[in-house]
Image (cartoon, coloured by chain):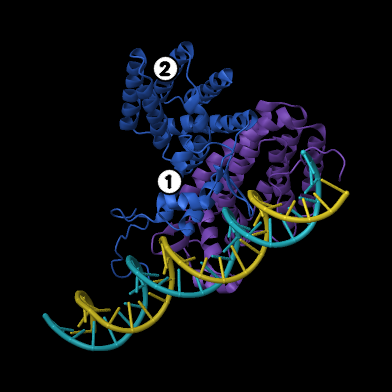
Chain colours: A purple, B blue, C cyan, D yellow
DNA sequence: TGACAGAATATTGAATGCATAATTCAATTC
DNA sequence: GAATTGAATTATGCATTCAATATTCTGTCA
């Protein structure tokens, strides 16, 4: 600790040690989770007082959290009226998916450029797990692994900017995705698409990886839409 | 509740009538503008007290504004240390441009699908104005029209989601773009690219419009990078 | 002189209080 | 009985206050 008299490296963005994250941040995360899980329904009005009592905090950090979530597009802040969980029309959902597809396409390209071999190994391993969960018809596990793969590919791009942009939109469709149950045919297709993506990444074929990922997402949307 | 008596149309997201925008929103906009214009330099620490005095408001709405700008990625909030204008490395700038290019590509595609003829008329008119400002070497006007064209194309896509995602990233590169002065050669090329884009839109050639827009942005970045 | 410890100061985080706008609801009128 | 008005209630916007953490300053000691 004492050697080397130079200025200590001083990580500038350290997250707080333990259990001492700012209240506003904590509230933001919990509220976001509640929205994503559907505990707070679209169109529902948020009562500040009720939430402060539920969380055991004052209105100040809660209101800061609301501002953040509004910036993320998860709720609307109406002057002197309060916060309302954004409701998404079919058309808006289509918009989000279209943009998301473009971002996933880019993710495919960037991942082929920037992923190191270990990252590809992990993606392939996850893809195999995905196949296994499909074979077992284990939907919850499939869902979890599916998310993990997408996350791994995003991470493999090395682009924090892309990760963040993607995340913001992914939040908004996650609610819709929760309720959508795949048909068996679509499910099988999805697994095969994932395997093709993993292969394209391994082959470092940027165009192919990109277009496969883009199409994968659009197919996903088509499947959801079919359910109405 | 729903179909009975004539439920009044009730615009739900009307912007406030006159001069009654929330303080926090006002502050958010002014701060964002200050950051974009370089009045607040990257790496600079924000002193809450100083700003409250400058704006003549209390810390509460200011802090709410900071939360929003942090969510937008324009500044970092460090626990117990305050807000710092994000500084962008060359690498991060490259990341943003890459994502932005993908979004502009999508914008080109969607605009060919969704733009009505009047929108195309306006884009063409702006493109002619752009040429004029180039002929006159009127950089400020060129800049303004350039922005207007991009905005018009984004608007023509009809996708609010795309507009917003684009805007968020555009904010972040705007600072860098401010200082970059085009070379004459690059300037001429940019005008020609714009004319090609307008033509592709008119021809309703989605692929062409998309790839032209994507490449236009990447060229722009290459030009900025060349300046280093 | 330089490094360290501890006090003094400044700054941020969160809670409370106050003013104003919105909503509710009962009384009044047609 | 329905619609309307206005008082009472509630909720939101903002300022202020209190508490906790970080930074600066100062004096001491090696």
The percent position of residue B226, horizontal first and vertical second, equals: 58, 17
Name above or below for residue C24 compared with residue A167: below
In the depicted view, which residue is nearer to us: C3 or B104? Answer: C3
- Relative placement, left or right, of A18 versus A175 is right
In the depicted view, which residue is nearer to us: B182 or A221? Answer: B182
User: Which-is-in-front pick, marks 2 and 1?
Assistant: 1
The percent position of residue B183, horizontal first and vertical second, equals: 48, 14
Per the rendering, the mark at residue B188 is none
The chain under label 1 reads B
In the depicted view, which residue is nearer to us: A7 or B100? Answer: A7
Q: Is residue A47 visible?
A: no
- Relative placement, left or right, of B136 versus C16 is left
Per the rendering, the mark at residue B191 is 2
The chain under label 2 reads B
Q: Residue at x 70, y 61 (%)?
A: A20
The percent position of residue B97, horizontal first and vertical second, equals: 57, 30
**What residue is pinned by disc 1?**
B29
The percent position of residue B142, horizontal first and vertical second, equals: 37, 22
Q: Is residue A185 visible?
A: yes
Q: Tell me the quarter of the picture where residue B17 sits.
A: bottom left
Q: Residue at x 68, y 46 (%)?
A: A13
Which structural element holds mark 1? helix
Q: Tell me the quarter of the picture where residue C2 sits.
A: top right
- Relative placement, left or right, of B5 versus A123 is left
Same chain for the residues under marks 2 and 1 in the image: yes
- Relative placement, left or right, of A169 versus A15 is left
Task: Specify which label sits upstream in the sequence, 2 or 1.
Answer: 1
């Amino acid at each position: 600790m004492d050697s080397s008299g130079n200025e200590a490296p001083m990580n500038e963005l350290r997250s707080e040690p333990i259990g001492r994250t700012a209240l506003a941040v904590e509230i933001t995360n919990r509220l976001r989770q509640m929205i994503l899980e559907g505990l707070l329904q679209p169109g529902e009005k948020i009562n500040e007082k009720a939430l402060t009592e539920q969380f055991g905090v004052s209105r100040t950090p809660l209101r800061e959290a609301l501002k953040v979530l509004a910036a993320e597009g998860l709720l609307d802040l109406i002057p002197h009226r309060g916060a309302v969980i954004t409701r998404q029309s079919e058309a808006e959902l289509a918009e989000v998916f279209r943009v998301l597809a473009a971002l996933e396409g880019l993710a495919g390209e960037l991942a082929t450029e920037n992923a190191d071999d270990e990252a590809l190994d992990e993606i392939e391993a996850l893809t195999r797990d995905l196949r296994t969960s499909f074979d077992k018809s284990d939907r919850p596990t499939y869902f979890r692994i599916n998310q993990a793969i997408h996350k791994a590919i995003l991470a493999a791009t090395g682009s924090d900017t892309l990760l963040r942009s993607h995340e913001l939109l992914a939040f908004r469709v996650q609610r819709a995705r929760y309720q959508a149950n795949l048909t068996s045919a679509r499910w099988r297709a999805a697994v095969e698409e994932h395997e093709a993506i993993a292969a394209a990444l391994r082959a470092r074929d940027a165009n192919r990886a990109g277009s496969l990922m883009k199409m994968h997402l659009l197919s996903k949307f088509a499947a959801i839409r079919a359910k109405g």
